[in-house]
Image (tube, grey):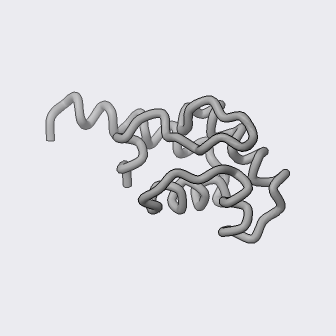
Amino acid sequence: MSILKKTHNAIYDIRLLNLSEKELHVVKVVSALDTYINGRVLSEILDLPETEINQMILNLQINNIIQEYTSGQTIVFSSEAIKKHR
C-alpha cells in the first residue's frame, strides 16, 4: 500500500472516530446504497425520526463525511474514497 493511500486511510479513520454508533450506521447504510437518498427516505429506512436523522446528517457534515446538506437534498459523500472506506 502506498504512503499516500495509508495517509488517506488514517485521515478517514480519524474522521470516523468522531462519530457515534448511530452515525456510523448511517454512513454504512448510505454507502451501501447504489442510489442517492435524502434524509426523509433515510429516516424511513432506519425507522428513526427525521429530526434525529437531520442532526446526524449535520454532524456528518461537520466531520467532513458528507457534503453540505439542506433538507430535501440528496446525501452526497465528501469523496468517493471515504464512501468506499472500510
- Please report the residue visible at 47 percent of the width from the left and 56 percent of the height from the top: 35
Query: Which of the pair 18/86 is nearer the observer?
Result: 86
- Position in image of residue 39 (x %, y %): 70, 51
Quadrant the N terminus occupies: top left
Q: At 68% from the left edge and 44% from the top edge, which residue is drawn? A: 57
Residue closer to the observer: 59 or 47:
47
Is 42 situated left or right of 13 in this image?
A: right
Q: Is residue 16 left or right of residue 50?
A: left
Tell me where residue 55 sits by quadrant. Answer: top right
Name which residue lies at 59% across and 61% down: 25
Q: Residue 22's x, y, as percent? A: 67, 59
Q: Is residue 11 above or below residue 31?
A: above
In this rendering, the answer to whether 12 lies above or below 40 is: above
Quarter of the picture containing the C terminus is bottom left
Give residue 34's position: percent from left, percent from top.
42, 59
Q: Nearer the viewer, residue 20 or 44?
A: 44
Q: Residue 2's x, y, as percent?
A: 15, 34
